Each structure stands twice: as C-alpha cells, then as structure tokens.
Amino acid sequence: MPIEHTNQTINQKTMKKLLLFTIVLVLMACSGVKKTKQALNSGNYTTAMNRAIKNLQDNKTKKGHQDYVLLLEEAFAKHAEKEIRRIQFLENGGNPANLITIYEGYSNLKRLQNRIRPLLPLPVYEEDRNAQFKFINYDNTILEVKDELSAYLYNNATHLLSNARNKMEYRSAYDDLKYLEDINPGYGDTSVKMDEAYQKGLDFVKVELKNETEQIIPERLESELLDFNTYGINNFWMQFHAQPIENINYDFAMELDFNQINISPERVNERQLIKEKVIKDGFDYVLDENGNVAKDSLGNDIKVDKFKTVTCNFYEFTQLKTAQIGANVRFKDLRSGQVVNSYPLSSEFIFEHVYANVDGDRRALDNNLVALLDLAAVPFPSNEQMVYDAGEDLKARLKSIVNRYQFN
C-alpha cells in the first residue's frame, strides 16, 4: 500500500475519533446545562447553584459556560429572596425556638456569597456586562442572632436539667448545649452542664455471664466476651459494665447464658486406597533386521519407551474433634423487671487434621495424595482450647447483636 494512501487513512480515522469526542463533549455539556435549568425551574435553587459553581470553577471564561453564568445569576437572586422572606417570617413570629433556623439561614447565605465571590467578575459576553449579584454583609446580623440564640439555648438547657422527668429530656438538654458549644465555644459553664446532661442521659447496662453447663468456660474467652471496648459500640447514650460500679442505678441488664457446651471424643478415622498407575520405566533400542540398533534419518539411535504398572496401598488418617456452644443473650429492663428481648446464639468449631502413609510404590499416587505423606499426627487441642476456638464465632455474633440493639 502506498505511504500517501496509508497516511490519508490514518488521518481519516483520527478525524473521526476527534469528531466523535467533540460530539460527546457537546452532549455532556448540554445535558449539564439542561439539568441545571430543570433544577432552577423546579425551585431547587441550591442544586442549580451548586452545578453552576462547579462548572464555572473549572473554567469561568469559557464561552460554552455562558449558560452557567446566567443560571447562577438567576438562581442566586431567587434563592436569596426566598431565604430572606422565610427568615423575616420567622423573625416576625417572635418564637425563640426558631432562632436556630434564623441563625443557620443567615449563615448559609453568607457561605453562599463566599463561594461565589472568588469567581467574580463573571462576564456575560453577548450583553457586554458582568453578572450581577446583590451581596449583603450579614456579619452584624449573624452576631446579634447568635447572642440571642446562645442565651436561649443556655437557658432552655438549664431549665431542662433542673426539671427533666426522663433521660430523653436530659439528652435534649445535651443536644442544645452541644450546638451552643459548636457556635459559641466557651459560653458560660456550657461544658460543665454538657457533662451533667450526658451523665444523666446515659443508659447503664449491667452485663452478666452465666454458665449452666458442666464445662469450664476458658477465662480468656470470658474476658474477651465481656470486653466491650473491642465491640466498637456506636451508641453514644449507652454504657456496658461487666464489673458493676457502686452508686450506679443500672437501667438494663444483658445476660449471656451458656446452656450447652458439647465436646466430641477424639477420633482418628482411617481410609485405605489401592492406587495403580502406568508409568514410564526406561526405554528399549529398536533393532533392525540384522539385529543392530536402528538409526533414524539423522543417524541417531531409535528408542522406544518402556512402561510398567505400579501399585501401592495408601492409608489416610483423619484426626477429628468438634466443639459446639449454645447460649442465649437476654436484655432485661431493670426498672420493670421484664425481659424485653432474647436472642439464641450458637457456634461450632471443628478440628480436623489429615495425614497419610503408604505401602508400595509411591509413584502410583497423584500429587495431592503425595503431599499428605509429608504430614504426621499432631496432638489434639485441649477441651479448653476447643471451647475458646468455638467462642470466636460466638463473639462476632454477640457483637453484631449488641451493635444493632436499641433499648429505647
């Protein structure tokens, strides 16, 4: 094929790829603009602004991004107007419970302006102007609302702490104080009251382990089952105590009752296999009609493989021992004395070790059987070790139950 024709073919393929790539980019850009318009027209101004800002951050002067400039300009104006109307309505209501919403409303407007400000100016080429954004300095307003909100949260939490009728109200007081600490760190004795609210809002769970079997539970297993630091419990309002603490009125009890521990006898099962295989066993020379070694066309001696059948007796031994654990975990409300939930637990551990020996020609064996000949009998694990190993799965099951359980 001529070089000129080859180059033309390559150039045509390259142009087709570039054209296809350009079409894909255009379609993607149109799709992005379309989705942004849909969000704007649906009143989802925040979504529209987020899409527009993301595209303009990549390249704000790109002509293909002009639609995003106009969409951002319109979405910001409508969003700011909507938010101000909402905030003013709440302010006119005079309900201090709305101060959080008012504070966050002003703060969100300020954050939005700070996201747009680095993009300015945003040129609108066809209209020979820059996009217009009516920015307002909300700093003094935010500070004033924060002062009012801080006083309200503090007073409301203090009242709850003094008059709470249940733990949920203490937790509500904690939430108010936590929010106060976040927006106004170091306000009064907020941290002290937070600690008080947390301690009074906690549920304390007493953990008990009972053994109703005739087997001994390994001390290491018992210790690990009761070590709730390893459970990764994500319930902020719950504390488990395996060792009860004086002067704590426990709300709930978690009882882990072992009701069954079965350990099988140590067994060794034997299996005999007779293996037979045809194997290569040297070679013979091919003789010609004169009784001499025949030669091939290259003058080399002609040989033929010899085969023979070999056999052996293969003895496989399997050491086997099992342990099974049955237990039950119960959650009890100590205030009412009622069992609120109960879950069965079970676990099994199987010790199995295989080894073998052979009588006869080892060459009759497959590779997977030959590997067993390098192994020998091993000591059986003790009953205590078997129970501990069975308890590994039990720990995982118990952890799953504790992590998903809700007392309230």
Image (cartoon, rainbow, N blue to C red):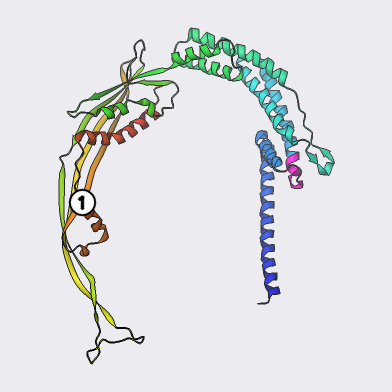
- Residue numbers of the magenta segment: 59-69
Label 1 CA crowd tier, 10 Å (few <14, some 14–19, many 20+): some
Observer-nearest of 133 and 204 = 204
Would residue 232 be visible to someone looking at this image? yes
For residue 388, what is the image quadrant? top left
**Kind of element beneath mark 1:** strand
49 over 166 or under it: above or below: below
358 over 330 or under it: above or below: below
Quadrant that contains the N terminus? bottom right
For residue 123, what is the image quadrant? top right
Q: Residue at x 81, y 37 (%)?
A: 130
Residue 261 part of the magenta segment: no
Q: Residue at x 61, y 17 (%)?
A: 184
Residue extending furthest toward the bottom? 290
Would residue 95 be visible to someone looking at this image? no
Residue extending furthest toward the top? 162
Question: Residue 219: x and y, percent?
Answer: 25, 27
Question: Residue 293: x and y, percent?
Answer: 26, 86
Q: Residue at x 67, y 58 (%)?
A: 20
Observer-nearest of 210 and 267 = 267
Name which residue type carries label 1.
Answer: Tyr
38 over 395 or under it: above or below: below
362 over 53 or under it: above or below: below
Quadrant that contains the C terminus? top left
Question: Residue 190: x and y, percent?
Answer: 55, 13
Label 1 belongs to which residue?
Answer: 355
Residue extending furthest toward the right? 128
Question: Residue 342: x and y, percent?
Answer: 30, 27
Q: Is residue 263 left or right of residue 96?
A: left
